[in-house]
Amino acid sequence: MRLALAGGFLLLAGAALAQDPPPPVAEDFVALFSSYCLQKFPDDGALASQAAADKLEALSPAQVKTIEGKPDGMGWMVTRGGVPYLLTIEQASLHSCVLRRTSDMVLDGAPLIAAAKSFVEASGHKLMPPVAFARPMAGGLVSNSLTLQELDEKDQPLPRAYMFFVVSHPPALRADGSLARAFYEIRFTRQMYRQQT
C-alpha cells in the first residue's frame, strides 16, 4: 500500500517537474474534509445544517454549476489560515462531497488519504490500493488522480470511492494581454454511486 501510494504521488509530483517531494496538504484541508465529507456526508441535510451553523458562505446555483459543470448540487466558500476552500456536493448519479483549493505548487494528498483510511477502517472496511490516472484536458490542463475504492468486511467492492486530484492549469492570457501564472487545483472527493432501482 505504501509503495503504491509513493508511486502514485510521484506521478502527481511529476506534473510540477519537482525534484523534491511535494509538501503535504495543510491540516486545515484535512480537518474541513473530515468535518463535512466524512462526518456529515452523505446526509446532505446534515451537512447543509452544519455549514449554516458554521456560517459558511453559500454559493449560488450558478456558481455551483460553474464549479461542478452540472446544474444540481450545493456549495459553500470557507477560508482557513488565509486560504479559500470550496466545499461542494454533487447530487446526481455520482453523489459526491468535494473539497478543493488552488495552489501555486503540487501538494501531497497523503494526509487526506490517511484520514479516509482511518474513517473506513473504523467501520470494518478498507480501501483498495490507489489507481493512478493522468488525463490531458482542453486548454492544456492535465488532471492527475488517485482513486481508492472502498471494500466491505468481506473484501467486496462497494459503490464508494475516495479520489485525490491535482489539476495543472498552464499560464493563461488575460483579457488585458498579460499572462496569468500557472497554478494547480487540489481536490479531494468522497463519492457514492447511487444504486439503480
Image (spheres, rainbow, N blue to C red):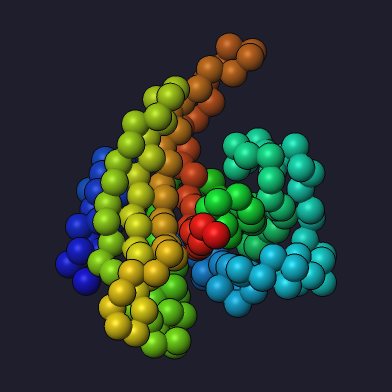
Return the residue nearer the eye: 125 or 134. Answer: 125
Task: Please provide percent x and percent y for residue 20.
Answer: 26, 53
Q: Which residue lies furthest to the left in this view?
A: 3
Q: Where is residue 25 in the image (x, y as percent from the top left)?
A: 45, 62
Residue name at image x 47 percent, y 50 percent: 186
Residue 84 x %, y %: 65, 52
Q: Nearer the viewer, residue 150 or 87?
A: 150
For residue 131, above or below residue 136: below
Q: In this view, does 149 lie above or below 62?
A: below
User: Which of these two is toward me, 178 or 133?
Assistant: 133
Q: Residue furthest top?
A: 177
* Residue at 44% over, 73% down: 116
In the figure, is residue 155 to the left or right of 185? left
Q: Residue at x 43, y 64 (%)?
A: 159
* Residue 180 shows in the view: yes
The quarter of the image holding the N terminus is bottom left
Q: Looking at the image, which residue is at 68% across and 58% down?
A: 79
- Residue 87, position in %: x, y? 64, 56
Q: Determine whether, in the image, residue 68 is placed left or right of residue 117.
A: right
Q: In this view, does 50 lie to the left or right of 115?
A: right
The quadrant of the rendering that contains the C terminus is: bottom right
Please indicate, yes or no, whether residue 127 appears anywhere in the rendered image: no
Figure quadrant of residue 17: top left
